[in-house]
Image: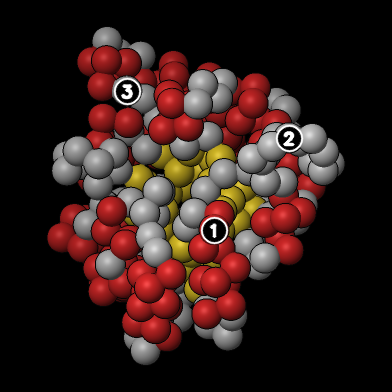
Amino acid sequence: MIRTPLVAGNWKMHGSRAAVDDFAAQLRNSECPATVDMLVCVPFVYLERLALALADTVVAVGGENIAETVEPGALTGEINGAMLADVGCRYVLVGHSERRAQQGEDDAVVARKVNAAAAAGINPVLCVGETLAERDSGQAERVLARQLQAVLTACSAQTLDKLTIAYEPVWAIGSGRSASPAQAQQMHAFIRTQIAASNVTLSRSMRLLYGGSVKPDNAAALFAQDDVDGALVGGASLNAASFMDIARSMV
């Protein structure tokens, strides 16, 4: 089954109005690969500005987080799915390792956020991955299986159809150290096997992204792997030229 590649950027807590405007202008003046889907996730305060700037392009805009509660209410500082959709978001990151570690989001919270995104018509990008200690102790696959099962068992088939999974070895995020193409393929194949245990058809159609120090110089080798369908790019997505170079590596 042919899966359309997706290259997604995650700005994290970076950006400014000037940076958004410059980034959008560069993308608009570049020829985006016709066979690759592109997505940029930015801080809440810049979402509408970027969505408007890219409105007539093929580049989608996404949020970096979403409230687990669907309905509006007395939840100071939270942003629900309807709000994200209202400003032009088509995707949202869920369960990023930094939120799991820094904000204490457990698997149950992550599963509720996946459901909240789908309920708002937004495509969730579920982040999973192991720490260096978990990998070194032989626990990597067990950790991924736990993170995946929490979502696979809590979400309907309709919700899972909207899902993209990003495998991010925590030890590679922002470290400059990337998993080798063989390591990435091994873990992506394991993820696909876990999905197949619940739904073979879904396992063949779901996009699996690699995240963890993806750069223009290592992207092509990662993308050449059978089960790597794109990337979730961190620091390199802040620069429009490098982001486009990574996207072109999928072609």
Instruction: Say which of 228 and 109 sits in front.
Output: 109
Q: Residue at x 27, y 58 (%)?
A: 236
Q: Disc 1 marks which residue?
A: 45
Point out the tag, 3 or 1, that comes first from the N-terminus.
Answer: 1
Point out the tag, 2 or 3, that comes first from the N-terminus.
Answer: 2
Where does the image place residue 107, in percent across and percent down from the top left? 58, 23
Mark 2 belongs to which amino acid?
Leu
Q: Disc 3 marks which residue?
A: 131
- Up/down of 9 relative to 161, above or below: below
Image depth: mark 2 or mark 3 in front: 2
SS at mark 3?
Answer: loop
The residues bearing labels 2 and 1 have C-alpha atoms spaced at a distance of: 17 Å
Where does the image place residue 194, in percent across and percent down from the top left? 53, 29
Horizontal side of residue 111 vs 35, given as left or right: right
Q: Residue at x 47, y 57 (%)?
A: 42
Q: Disc 2 marks which residue?
A: 75
Q: In which quadrant of the rendered image does the C terminus lie?
A: bottom left
Indicate the quadrant where residue 65 lies.
Answer: top right
- Up/down of 67 relative to 118, above or below: above
Indicate the quadrant where residue 200 lies.
Answer: top right
Mark 3 belongs to which amino acid?
Thr
